[in-house]
Image (cartoon, helix red, strand yellow):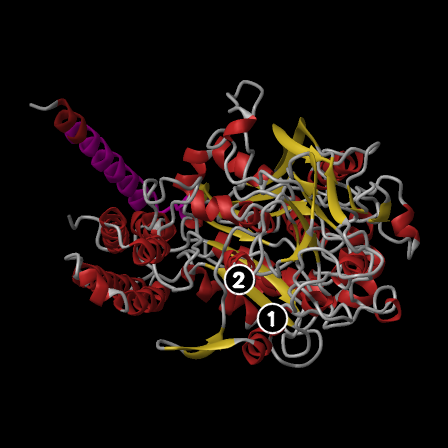
Amino acid sequence: MNWLKVLGISLGAAVILAIGLLIGHFGISGDEPEWVKNLGQDLDEGFIQQFMKEVDSEKIKENLRTLSKKPHVATSDADEELVRLLLSRWKDSISGLDEAREERYNVFLSFPDENNPNNVKVLTPEGVTKFESNRTEDQLTDDQKDQTILQPFLAYAPNGTVKGKLVFANFGRISDFQYLNNLINLNGTIAIVRYGGIGRVNKAINAAKFGVVGVIIYTDPKDINDGKFNPDETYPHSWYMPPSGVERGSFKENFGDQLTPYYPAKEYTYRIPESEIRGISDIPAQPIGFENARTLICDLGGPHAPEAWQGSLGCIYNIGPGFRPGNFFNSDVQVNVYNKRTIRSSANVMGLIRGAVEPDRYVMYGNHRDSWVHGAIDPSSGTAVMMEITRILGTKLKSGKWRPRRSIIFGSWGAEEFGLIGSTEFAEDYYSKLKERTVAYINVDISVFANATLRVQGTPPAQGVVFAASKQVKTPKNDLTVYDNWKSHSNRTSSQYGIIPQIGTLGIGSDYAPFLHYLGITCMDIAYTYDTRVTSARIYPAYHTAFDTFDYASKYIDPGFTSHQTVARTAGNVLLRLSDSLILPLGARDYVETLDGFYKQAETFQTNLSKYNISLEPLKWAINRYKAAAESLEEVIKKLSDAETPLKIRMINDQLMLLDRSFTNNFAFPDRLYFSHVLWATRSSSVATFPGLADAYQTAMESNLRQHWDLVHRQVTVAIQAVDNAASTLETVTKI
């Protein structure tokens, strides 16, 4: 007899015997131990209401004041102070958690040289400097006088001094450079581009393909300030970015530590050579403020830029190359970058509340701690909210009034601004445990962009729990619930539910990325934001500048901190539902509309796919199988009774927990680090369908090469397999 069968028979007999003994014992004695009663522990709506009542806007305000008092770039002394602050709060005997500790990683970072600042110059043919960019932002309040403020730079931008004629390249997209390349010679030029449209580093990567040797990036008032550029219209007189404001940022495509992909950056870890890092720029780049950009762009010669490229600097934008007759005529632009790359110790601060019934199931809640300067909004608004949530729950925990059904893990991530490093290293470090046991991850980074409405991004299974929470919270400005107010600002028509709030998709913009794309965990990102009918700002205007301060936040983003309070109530409500509900409040059926939408878009490819004998019919069958499985599981959940066994509850919960995981394929995107979720990997194609298929189809249509159509066929297979796997996960576990 096979030894596995022997083991199975023996184990089965032992389990049956144990169950029989327990039933016999408790049936005879009539006693029911506490642990048996706890197995049925379910969500306490009264506790949720009490939690929300205790969220204190004044405490959030004071948290933010403390967190944003000093500039606290990753690994700085001020960052380490905040590590100690969080540890002290989470270890507090009255309001602390069960456990709090720091997790350290030796990570690859990049900083400007304090003694040799980066700059942009205009040089005459004789080498005379006619213009030099500001080295610091204007001191408009005492906050900008802090000597530890990190000068404007782009982390990981390569060192170098490059010089050439200036051209204006709009957003720096491939299409922008193609347009210029048809009109002028780009070889050896310097391109000035505006933020937006695509990622920072992609502007330089694209530029290098056309022979550009250096890039200058600025924020156009049209994109961030609703066109306002005069000092008396901007901060400190309003929320708009002042003319000297410079957006700092990470200048690379891939998240996580760049030298240790897929492995935690510990002392023992193998590190690849810097020359093997993928997704960074080969040419120097430097950000400047729009007052400096105005000096350069408004003096450019050459043809007028297209109407769609015109901004709000108060002049007609020309494309160059070079300057028109006048002060800068015949002059070159020089970009000087002196960044330093180094390895430093960065800390995550982790807090734990152990679950009473299912301690091996984790609900995670996190935000990063580090900022480019004071970081009042990004990220301290999120950390201030997290600290208030943990204060309330910690107090209930320490007083013995509450313990969640499942364990809750809080994470204060380090070095996020350098590319989601702390969260990614944690995901790598605990890969197996997190992948097998994590129910969901809640991210609250910038908790308040502005004070108009809720904004949520997430995977479809999270939709129901967010809706349920938002229906129980009142908005700070009127009698509407957060749900109804949200629906009035941003909505869509659902085939299942009618008109509902719009939940956005998750990219790689914050710490949810490694948990979603690498581990396949259901994720959501929760924030309050502005009314897009009132402003066209692409993000809050002080983003990543020296003006993102407590003064800015308290005057212009959320006076009274009631929107912070609203986010804390909503996110905390979601957290409690996920940690305390007997049946996980994750919706399997909510993926149906996504799959139908993706298929409908993919159908537009079918005419060309047929030429290569590629059919989408198996994909349609897989989606129909998924629909049937999701509906069947939902019916099972509806019919559950109080007499259900804990094992059946656990089985259903595992099906829901593992749903997003079932859409992952570690081989789906072989050329891309970390991406494994077949539905939510980022894509370059504008077609909203399975991302691997969309991008492969776009490439094949451009090249018409057989090898590229083979890759399309492969991606169709990847999509079919992913949907089939998800359907199988939802079906009865005994069905093979």
User: Which mark identifies residue 636?
Assistant: none
Q: Is 126 contained in the magenta span?
A: no
In the rendered image, which residue does mark 2 sit on? Answer: 179
* Foreground pick, 504 / 654: 504
- Magenta span dominant secondary structure: helix
Q: Bin the neighbour count of mark 2 within 10 Å (Cα to Cα): few under 14, some 14-19, many 20 and up.
A: few
Indicate the quadrant where residue 74 lies.
top right
Residue under label 1: 306
Instruction: Tell me which segment is drawn in magenta.
Output: 9-36
What amino acid is at disc 1?
A: Pro
Q: Earlier in the sequence, mark 1 or mark 2?
A: 2
Relative to 107, residue 617 above or below: below
Where residue 330 appears, as percent x and y from the top left, is 76, 52
For this rendering, which residue is in front, 33 or 609? 609
- Residue 438 visible? The answer is no
* Mark 2 element type: helix
Q: Secondary structure at mark 1?
A: loop
At 50% from the left edge and 54% from the top edge, which residue is drawn? 507
Residue under the image location 30 percent in, 39 percent down: 22
Location of residue 98 in the rendering, given as x and y in whole percent from the top left corner: 61, 38
Q: Quadrant of residue 611?
A: bottom left
